[in-house]
Amino acid sequence: MPHRAAHIRCLAVTAAIALLPVASAQALPTLHHGDRGRSVAKLQRALHLGDDGVFGRGTLHAVKRFQRRHGLTADGVVGAGTWRMIRRSLHQHAARAAGAGGRGVRTRGASVRLLQARLGVAADGVFGPGTARAVRRFQRAHGLTADGVVGPATWSALGVSGSHPVLKRAHLRGRPGGSGIPALVLRAISAANRIAGFPYRYGGGHRSFHDSAYDCSGSVSYVLHGAGLLGRPRDSSELMSWGQAGRGRWITVYANAGHTFMIINGKRYDTTGRWDTGSRWQRVDRSSAGYVARHPAGL
């Protein structure tokens, strides 16, 4: 069982807290919102977050969710009790992983969607070129071989416990969208993935499609341009009359004078919520009341 053993060893490295004696939780520092450093990065990895070492709002919300889920006082302060519960939770995950076997190689499906969610890209379940680029970026950032293949080491660095298949890029063989998704929609998803984690800046993305930060309409303009649907950046008011009226099957832009977001293949792409998720891709829907719905012709 060499594959399973390697997986367990990698999991043990990234979930090091789980392997510490219970008493060692006392030695870990108490962490608060605003703290920085290696201990914060260790906490973030344990909670399956991006490990930037900054105890920001996203980390605070994740800590409170963990505390509520495990019957602790949800104050967002990581003291000995929270560390101890994190250690216990990771130990349970590691034990379950030890009894699980690998499941081969996949290019589509639920494991790909899980990967995409962890990377903060569109979770369409197809390991396409946009996902492959996101994987390589993640691997380079975490000191892994940037081969675009998601094996035990990459799963472990993502903070995902248990047994998961090796994931590789799907070869779409020229079919439009590979799994029935039109090629233009895949291009939009790929463009959205490229700037999903970029900072927000008012006016960002309006002088040029290529910028270091994007506001709401700048983000939507970038995505539409990436799909070949827009020739110049547009602000929210202009997007209210762009394309055709109503919702589209694959892409819908919602705009009013003050804000713009879009739905791509059923997933919300929106700067609102980025502070909590770290990505423009959002897991929950929002009301479209007060917005004009527009869509590209045929999509």
Image (tube, helix red, strand yellow):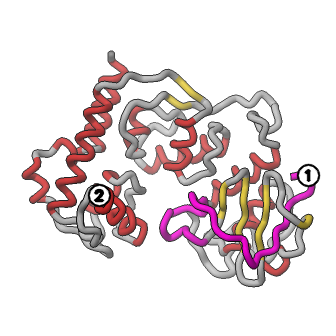
* Front one among 113 and 205: 113
Residue at image location 56% in from the left, 36% down from the top: 110
Could you tell me how far apart the alpha carbons at marks 2 and 1 are, in whole angstroms? 46 Å
Left or right: 294 in relation to 64 = right
Give the residues drawn in magenta, as a range. 272-299
Measured as percent of width and height from the top left, residue 185 is found at 78, 49
In the figure, 26 relative to 137: above or below? below
Measured as percent of width and height from the top left, residue 74 is found at 29, 68
Residue 260 position by quadrant: bottom right
Residue at image location 77% in from the left, 56% down from the top: 226
Q: Which amino acid does label 1 sit on?
A: Gly
Measured as percent of width and height from the top left, residue 108 is found at 62, 32
164 falls in the magenta region: no
In the figure, 61 relative to 207: above or below? above
SS at circle 2: helix
- Residue 41 in sight in this render: no
In this view, which residue lies farthest toward the bottom? Answer: 257
* Front one among 156 and 265: 265
Residue under label 1, please give it: 298
SS at circle 1: loop
Residue under label 2, please give it: 43
Measured as percent of width and height from the top left, residue 78 is found at 23, 65
- Residue 241 in sight in this render: yes
Please state which of the two labelled residues, at mark 2 or mark 1, is closer to the viewer.
Answer: 1
Residue 174 position by quadrant: top right
Residue 152 position by quadrant: top left
Q: Earlier in the sequence, mark 2 or mark 1?
A: 2
Q: Which amino acid does label 2 sit on?
A: Leu
In this view, which residue lies farthest toward the left? Answer: 23
Residue at image location 23% in from the left, 41% down from the top: 91
